[in-house]
Amino acid sequence: MTSHIKDTLLKIAILGAGALGCAIGATLPEGGHETWLIHRSPEHVHATRSHGLRVADASRTRQVHVPPHTRPVDTAV
């Protein structure tokens, strides 16, 4: 039996969009996955909606836009 998971695009909600959740959540859309961030702070959600996530790694710095929410029910997952 072979697995075709590598060819499957996923819908993923990151519950807990702190530093690590945002770092992971910023990379998933680059792989084609539909991604949402869930954070309890309305201020954090507002800032992410307004400015996106600033992601810096060894090769570049970029702005990534991942839809943020305060309630999981507001995502399409």
Image (spheres, helix red, strand yellow):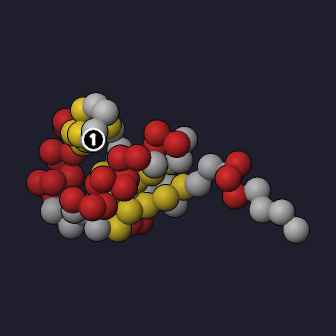
Q: Is residue 57 visible?
A: yes
The spot of residue 16 in percent (x, y) is: 28, 67
Residue 4 shown left or right of residue 67 in the figure: right
Task: Residue at 11%, 54% (x, y): give it.
Answer: 43
Q: Position of residue 54 (x, y in %)?
A: 21, 39
Which image quadrant is residue 4 in?
Answer: bottom right
In the picture shown, does residue 1 fall above or below 5? below
Disc 1 target residue = 57
Q: Quadrant of residue 21?
A: bottom left
Q: Quadrant of the N terminus?
A: bottom right
Query: How dense is the environment of label 1, judged by Cα within 10 Å: few (below 14), some, or many (20 and up)?
Result: few
At label 1, the amino acid type is: Asp
From this viewpoint, is residue 74 visible?
no
Report the front residue among 42 and 55: 55
Image label count = 1
Q: Position of residue 12 (x, y in %)?
A: 49, 58
Q: Residue at x 51, y 48 (%)?
A: 34
Residue shown at 31% from the left, 33% from the top = 59
Q: Is residue 72 above or below residue 45?
A: below
